[in-house]
Amino acid sequence: QVQLVESGGGLVQAGGSLRLSCAASGRTLRTYGMGWFRQVPGREREFVAAINWSGGSTRYADSVKGRFTISRDSARNTEYLQMNSLKPEDTAVYYCAAAQRFTLGTISLPDEYDLWGQGTQVTVSS
């Protein structure tokens, strides 16, 4: 059974940085597209970033462009989200996800993803 486990969340001051990791176990996800979403209570899950299987194609939400960077290490079956210049509005539970098919035009949709992690809390204080 495949599991995605996020780590790296925590409390940080505005302007600070965090690096989230998502480790997959049980199966290689080398051919999967990978993504990050976030959610705050009472709101829908929001797309943050996605990367294709080779790492050669990425997509970001406008709200994080220039501040967040998604990457992956297929040898380690792990994806990362480097978050810089964090703002209080970035506070949320962050989820990693894996998609068997990566289509740039639709990869921001949660329904495109087949596997989800349990989430890690990121809190940015002002």
Image (cartoon, grey):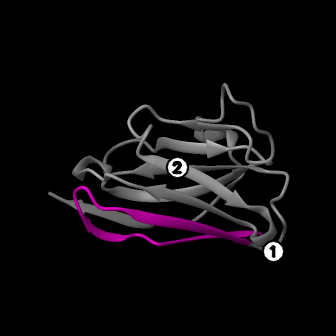
Q: Which mark is residue 111?
A: none
Looking at the rendering, the stretch of residues picked out in magenta corresponds to 1-24
Of all residues, the one furthest to the top in this rendering is 105
Of all residues, the one furthest to the left in this rendering is 126
| Pointer 1 local density, CA inside 10 Å: few below 14, some 14–19, many at least 20 | few
Distance, label 2 to label 1, CA atoms, is 26 Å
Does dot 1 land on a helix, a strand or a loop? loop
Q: Residue at x 49, y 43 (%)?
A: 48
Instruction: Residue 9: say if magenta.
Output: yes
Q: As rendered, which of 74 and 5 lies closer to the eye?
A: 74
Instruction: Residue 33: say if magenta.
Output: no
Up-down relation of residue 88 to residue 123 (above or below) = above
Give coordinates of residue 34: x percent, y percent.
Answer: 68, 51
Residue at mark 2: 69
Q: Is residue 118 visible?
A: no
Residue at mark 1: 26
Q: Amino acid at mark 2?
A: Thr
